[in-house]
Structure formats: C-alpha cells, structure tokens
Amino acid sequence: MSQSHIILIRHGEASVGWASHPDPGLSKKGRLQAKNTGKGLIDLISHYQLCSSPKKRALETMEILNNKNRYPVKIDSNFIEIPSANIHEEKKNEWLMSIFTSPIEELPVTVTEWRNNLIHWLQNAEGNFIITTHFMVINVLISSIINNNVILYFHPDYASRTEIFLKNGNLEQIILGDDKKTVINL
C-alpha cells in the first residue's frame, strides 16, 4: 500500500510582471508571504522530498521555506510555469486568459505536452513532497484529478498551500490553497 501527500506551494509575489521579465525573483511582499507559509511547514519539511520549479521566484520561495536550503532540493522542470516563450510580450495576457477557458483538447501542442508531463509525474509520484511552483501548474494538477475539461479550476493565492492525498494511486482528499482572485503579474 502506497500513500502520498503532495503539498503544492505557489511562489510568493514576483518583483515584476511575468510578461515583462522572463524570470523575476520575489518582491519584498513575496518574501514575507513565503516566510509566513514556511511557519506552517516547519514540522514537515525534514520528512518530505523538496522540489522546485527552476524559475527564480519558486527557488527563492523554497529557499525561504527550507530555512536557507537546510535540506536538499530537487530542481524539477516538470513544475515550471506554462510554456509561453513563443508568445509576444504584449499578447501574453490575452493568450493566458484564452488558455484558462480552452477545452483541454483545444490547447496548443506545447501546453498539452507540458500538461501531460505534469499528469504523468502525479500518476507516478511516490512518497511525500513539498513543491514550490506556479499558479497554472497547481491548476493543471487539480483539474486533472477531478477531470475538469479546462485547466483553470481555482485561483491559488501567492504562497498558498494546496494539498493532494493519494492512496494506492487513488485520490483520497484535496485541500485547496487560499482561493483569492489574485492578479497574476503580467
């Protein structure tokens, strides 16, 4: 019998917008958000596998949660934000809004591949994880578990904690992170 507890932490607020900078770090407020979230993880962090998106804001969030990298962290590109390198800066906001509501079967190929990699990871996850990642990654995973036909399911706030409990590969429970309609820094 295998059990997994997966804690997805959305990175703290970025210092600049997603559309205007390819890899911003955390703002001062984002650092405080990560610190506050870390207080609730202090008893778990040493017993969980730690993973992070390679993006700077996710890495900085993990560094704060992990007490300046006290425990090893796996940087895993599965948890990187939605692929948008080929989308022009001025079009990113409009593009992202269309992705939110597009049926899964109508997603662009790069987004479909990214989504499939995340779902494959989840289906093969064994053990307990704390993962710092992005708004859309969290939505992909939750939407896939509940068989939602679009990626967007909810609006996890900055540094919020979303939890997935699996037993023998089957969903036991989901605890959604703070659902605030936060502005995604574009």
Image (spheres, helix red, strand yellow):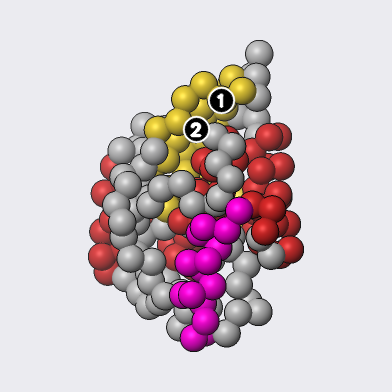
Q: Secondary structure at mark 1?
A: strand
Disc 1: CA contacts within 10 A as few (<14), some (14-19) or many (>=20): some
Identity of the amino acid at label 2?
Answer: Ile
* Mark in the foreground, 1 or 2: 1
Q: Secondary structure at mark 2?
A: strand
8, 62: nearer the viewer: 8
Q: Position of residue 121 (x, y in %)?
A: 68, 42
Q: Is residue 90 magenta?
A: yes
Q: Establish if 105 lies above or below 25.
A: above
Tell me where the magenta segment starts and ends, as one range: 89-103
183, 61: nearer the viewer: 183
Q: Position of residue 20 (x, y in %)?
A: 45, 83
Q: CA distance from mark 1 to mark 2?
A: 8 Å
Quadrant of the rendered structure where residue 184 is?
A: bottom left
Q: Is residue 64 left or right of residue 36?
A: right
Q: Which residue is mark 2?
A: 164
Task: Tell me what residue is drawn at x 59 percent, y 37 percent.
Answer: 147
In the picture, the quarter occupied by the N terminus is top right
Asked if marks 1 and 2 touch (Cβ < 8 Å), the reply is yes
Q: Is residue 69 magenta?
A: no
Q: What numbered label is drawn on residue 171?
A: 1
